[in-house]
Structures are given as structure tokens and as C-alpha cells.
Amino acid sequence: MTPPRKDGVPPWPPIGHDGLAMVGKRLSIPGGRELRGGPTFVPSAVNRSLESFLAGEDTALDALVRSEVLESWSHSAEHLAPVTDHAPVISEAVERWRSTRMASAFQAIAGELEDVAAAGDFVAAVTDEQGVIVWVAGGRTMRRRAEAVGFAPGGRWSEDAVGTNALGVALRTGRPSAIRATEHFSPIVQNWVCYSAPILNPNTGRPAGVLDLSTTWSRANPLALSTVSAMARNLELMLRASPHERRLQLRVLGGGDVLLDGVVLPLAPRQVELVTVLSLHPGGLTLETLHELLHLNGGGSISSTKAEVSYLRRHLGDMLLSRPYRLAEQCGADHLDALVALREGRVDDALTLYRGPLLPRSQCWAIEEHRAVLESAIRGAVVNDPTPARVAAARAAIPYDTYLADLADGYRTR
């Protein structure tokens, strides 16, 4: 029995040299029955079923094709035609991933995954939360084949990018998946078999990436699915046991500081504006919408906004997510906390947070609008239920408000 690690994280079930050999050897799988449940896999029959599906023919597909695959075909057909010859490339995703907690935790199992890939002539891959491959290893033959179709760092393998494949299915469903030969939607990988397991974010329960082993159909091996599943679970345990949770904090009332793990980041005013606008839209923004909110009155270009986002990501790492652009859940902002306090009737707490106007020097339209809303809300809360302390605090934060000045003078003359 393998002893537990000193840090308390149990090791993933080791394969050992015998296990590596089993994963690496070619198994005889009569009728392709390496997966339990569902109809027996007959590649030619499934290929004809895909043709019937694409032609819209009403045939009994579920007698030949697994329900998981049919569901994925339907999802894929909504986004693309099966003639895709290469995965789209998002090269900046690789650099972004390297600064994440996931990347740090993955280093503990990277060597084992490389060994499995080399022993079985697999290509091993890890993706980010968007299905973009950020790490690859494997035998020379499979690496060469993989690179030819974009199964390489930067290649996006979600279902809406290349159609049915195990990485995309695992990412969408949050469950381990094996996709065999002609079950793939796109012909470019219909002689492949892919085994993938999602890596679930311990904070959200949603897939933060996928671990995959792929090879040619002639080398199909069901042990690969249990291998990637075990390794993914171990990676989740390491993420859950991480003693340090990164946190982003915006202090933009009366100033303009952005802190990561308690350290003020050296950001230019435009980057602070960008982070603040994103904090106002937790559901995320497209690049175009983000640009419009930053430059409502013209000026700048979308390419310059994209460059600003890229620069910002160098500082924020996995705190800045994409597709759409949004901040991670571990983000706090004083301007949002002040609004929450007002909604809950905690006027004194809101005044403690409200040290002054939101990014007072910013001329960004979206920030100017929110600045006015927040200032009006603070003022209204104080005017509706004034006390000497509240009026004094509001007067200090909004010194140009004549009504608050009169209220403050009235308290002083009593």
C-alpha cells in the first residue's frame, strides 16, 4: 500500500511498471466492447448513423449509438459542420494557465502522466476551463498526428469548436468520457479514441479543465479512462487542500488600488478602470462590449482594449477569466460592498466603506455612471435618516454637496 503524502493529500492510485505496461499494450476488444452499457460499438454502423443524423433521417439511432454520443452530436451540430480540419487556436491561454493554481498543482502528477503517455503511445493533454489545451506530452508518433489537427497547446477542443470528442464532452457534462473512432463528430479524429476526465473546481463544482489520454483506435485501452479519472480526482484533492486561496480586492472608493493577496498591484489607471468595469458585470463581457463601456464617446480601438486585457492578465493570472471576460469569484470590491450594505439598511457600514467617489479621476462613462448612482444612494440614505456622525462622514466623502454642508453646519450650531 502506498503511504499517504506528508501534506495529507493521498496519492493517486499508482499504476506501477506492470500497470504502465498494461495501459501500453494493445488489447483485443471483440466488437469494441470496452465500455459498459449502451449498444455494442461497431465503427462502420456508427459512421452510417452519423451520416443519417446529419441528413436528418428519422432512424433508430439509439439502437446503434450511445445516448451520450447522440446528445453530443446534437450539441455539436448547433455550432459547426463536421468538416472542421483543425482546432481553432487561442495561444494566449497557455501563458495565462501557467500562473494558475491548477498549473502549480498539476506539476505533482505531470511526470506520471508523461510516463503513461510514453508507455502506451498516447498523447496526454490538459485543458483549461474553456477546453483549450495548455499542456501536452506523449510519444513521437501520436504527437505528430496530434499537432496536425491542432491537438497541441493553444488548440481549443470544446464541442462547439471541433464537435464531439471526449475532452469536450467531459468539459460540458462534468463526467469522465470516452469517445471512440466514428463516434467523433469530425473526420479528423475518427481514427482516434480519447479518454477524458474533468478536473472539478473545489469552490464551484464546475469543470476547471480536463485531463485526457488519446491514441489511435487500433490501440484502444479502457484502462486509460480509469487512469485519467484517478489522476483528475487526485488533482482535485490537491486543489482542495491548498492552504492558500488567492483573493482579488478592489479599493476604488476615494482611490484606485487593486490588491492581489493583500499586495497592491502596479496597475495603470486604465487597467484599474478595466477591473472596476468587470466587477460591475459578474456575468462577464465580450471584448466588444467591454470596449464600448470603456470608450462610449469614441477613442481607442478594440485591439488596444484587447492589449490592455492581456497586460492585466499578467498581473491577475487566474483571477481574470475569459469567454466572456470576467473576474473570478474570489473577488471583493468596496463599491459593491457599500451598495450591499445600503440595501440591507446598514448605513453606517456603507459610510465606513465610502471613503470618497468611485475612481474620482476616471472619465470612463461606465464608471462615471456608477459613481453617480452610488453617490446618490449614499447621500439619500444619510438625508433620509441623518445623525451627526452620518452627516459628518458623508460631508467628508462628498465635500462639494451643499445640502450636506448645510446639514453639517446645522448640527454644529445646535
Image: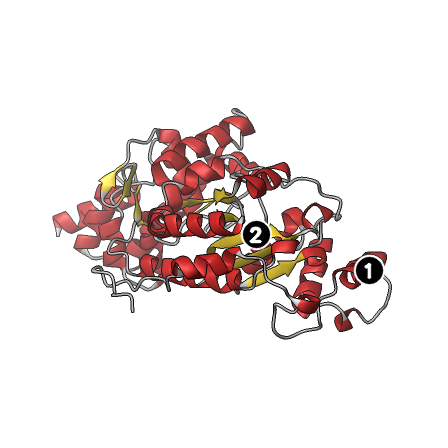
* Image side of residue 200 versus residue 286, left or right: left
The residue to which callout 2 is attached is 214
Residue type of the residue flagged with mark 2: Ser
Evaluate whether residue 311 shows in this view: yes
Mark 1 or 2, closer to the camera: 2
* Near-viewer residue (356 or 381): 356
The residue to which callout 1 is attached is 48
Residue at image coords 37%, 34%? 314
Residue at image coords 75%, 48%? 81
Badge 1 local density, few (<14 within 10 Å), some, or many (20+)? some
Q: Identify the mark at residue 63; answer none if there is no mark.
A: none
Residue at image coords 62%, 40%? 145
Which quarter shows the N terminus?
Answer: bottom left
Quadrant housing residue 46: bottom right
* Image side of residue 199 versus residue 56, left or right: left
Quadrant housing residue 7: bottom left
Disc 1 and disc 2: Cα gap in Å?
A: 23 Å
Question: In terms of sequence position, does the residue under pointer 1 or pointer 2 come before the other?
Answer: 1
